[in-house]
Each structure stands twice: as C-alpha cells, then as structure tokens.
Amino acid sequence: MELSNNIIFYLKKHHTAIVSTFDDKGRIHCSIKGIVGIMPEGKVHIIDVYKLNTYKNLLKNPEISVTMFNEKNFTGYTLQGKAKIVPRNDINDHLILEWEERVTKRIATRVIESVQTETESNKHYEAELPKKPQYLIEVDIDNIVDLSPPHMRRK
C-alpha cells in the first residue's frame, strides 16, 4: 500500500507510536516503540529495545497496528498490517543511527524544556534505555485508519 505524502510527513513528525499486538489468549497488548524508517511503498520500521511481550506476540501472530496521534490538533492514524522481525545483526546501520539520533534529540528536548520552564528533571528516561535495539519490526501496511474527526479529514 502506497503511503501518501501527508502520512509520511505525519510519521516523520511523530517519533513514537503505540504498537498493538495479540497475545496467545487473543488479548491486545500495547507498547510504546520508536519509529525509525518510513518507506513510501508502505513499510514502516520500528525499533524495539526489549525482547519481551511484543516480540513473543509477533512470533506467534504477525498482525500489528501502529497508532500515532496529536491530541492538540485532533489528528492521528492507525497503520495496520503484518510484521516481520528483523534480527539485531541484520538491521541496516542507517536505522541504528536514526534511532541513536532520535534518542539524543529527546534528551536534548527534555533538558531545553526543563531550562525554559525552570523545572528540574532528575531523570533522563531516554538515557536509561538499552543502548542497542534488540530487533527491528518491519511493518508491511495493508490498511490506514484516519483517527481525525470526519469533518477534519483531508480528502
């Protein structure tokens, strides 16, 4: 499925997403993951720094949805499709670099916001994440759901 320029732009602005998978009892499992790559032909690359529930779920059932939203603008999308697990050693170096740059930007943004608002942050949560991702999730998108209210959707 081809991704429109609007979707690509939206994905690039939103570095994190809620990833939903199904566990072995058919229950929905949600987790926050980092988007590192968008391919116009309908693939999205997501980094996972842990090899826990999402990983186990995808081994048994590749169905996945990826949701991003902006509560201020009342916009959002859910991308649905099938996931492929890419082992750590097979992840392209440019995606690892993209992940590292995004983590660094998040830390810098947190520090700048703390200075601007004159609030102290004792934690830099991003800095405590594992340094290397455990694997990559490659999503082959087959459906896009526009979460915006109907009257605000782009034609």
Image (cartoon, rainbow, N blue to C red):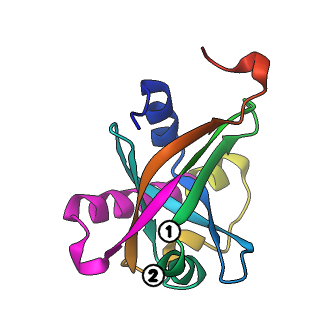
Compared with 29, 17 (above or below) is above
Residue drawn 54% across the image and 73% down it: 61
Which mark identifies residue 130?
2
Q: Residue 103, image x and y in percent? A: 45, 62
Name the image quarter holding the N terminus: top left
Name the amino acid, label 1: Pro
Q: What residue did someone put label 1 on?
A: 62
Q: Please give the range of residues in magenta.
A: 81-109
Name the image quarter holding the C terminus: top right
Compared with 57, 146 (above or below) is above
Residue 97 colored magenta?
A: yes
Residue 3 colored magenta?
A: no
Left/right placement of residue 139 relative to residue 120 reads left
**Res 101 → quadrant:** bottom left
Mark 2 vs mark 1, CA separation in Å: 24 Å
What crowding class fits label 1: few (fewer than 14 Cα within 10 Å), some (14-19), or many (20 or more)? some
Q: What secondary structure is found at the residue carrying circle 2?
A: loop
Name the amino acid, label 2: Pro
Which mark identifies residue 75?
none
Q: Residue 5, image x and y in percent? A: 42, 26
Q: Nearer the viewer, mark 2 or mark 1?
A: 1
